[in-house]
Image: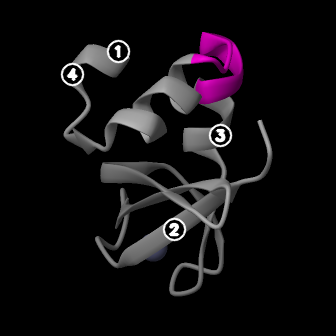
Amino acid sequence: MTVESLPTFTHPARQRWESIPADIRQRLLANVWCGQCRHEVTITNFTGAIKGGDLLLVGKCAECHGDVARVIEGV
Ligand SMILES: [Zn+2]
């Protein structure tokens, strides 16, 4: 998945996201905790925004399609 194909990122969130190396981004997307599955899952259909100085990704669990989120601190 390339950043160009990402759904909805605010401009600052996209800049922050693009400053992260691609291999790290891939890892961040693939180990999001899902409270329903109770293990790490891949986040899909996510959006990105800056919240309190951190990059916040909100999307769906690839397995149960429940809501999941990941905060990426001070990148
Ligand atoms: Zn899940």
From mark 3 to mark 1, how far is it between C-alphas? 14 Å
Q: Position of residue 18 (x, y in %)?
A: 52, 18
Number of other residues with Cα within 10 Å of mark 2, as a class: few under 14, some 14 to 19, many 20 or more: some
The quarter of the picture where the C terminus appears is top right
Residue behind mark 3: 28
Task: Looking at the image, tell me whether mark 3 or mark 1 is earlier in sequence order.
Answer: 1
Q: Say which quarter of the image contains residue 34.
A: bottom right
Colouring: one colour
Dot 4 beta carbon under 8 Å from ligand 1 = no
Give the amino acid type for the residue marked by disc 4 in the picture.
Ser
* Quarter of the rendering occupied by the N terminus: top left
Magenta region: 19-25
Q: Distance from label 4 to label 3 (Cα)?
A: 17 Å
x, y percentage for residue 54? 67, 55
- Which of the numbered marks, if any, corresponds to residue 32? none
The label on residue 2 is: 1
In front: 26, or 11? Answer: 11
13 horizontally vs 53: left or right: left
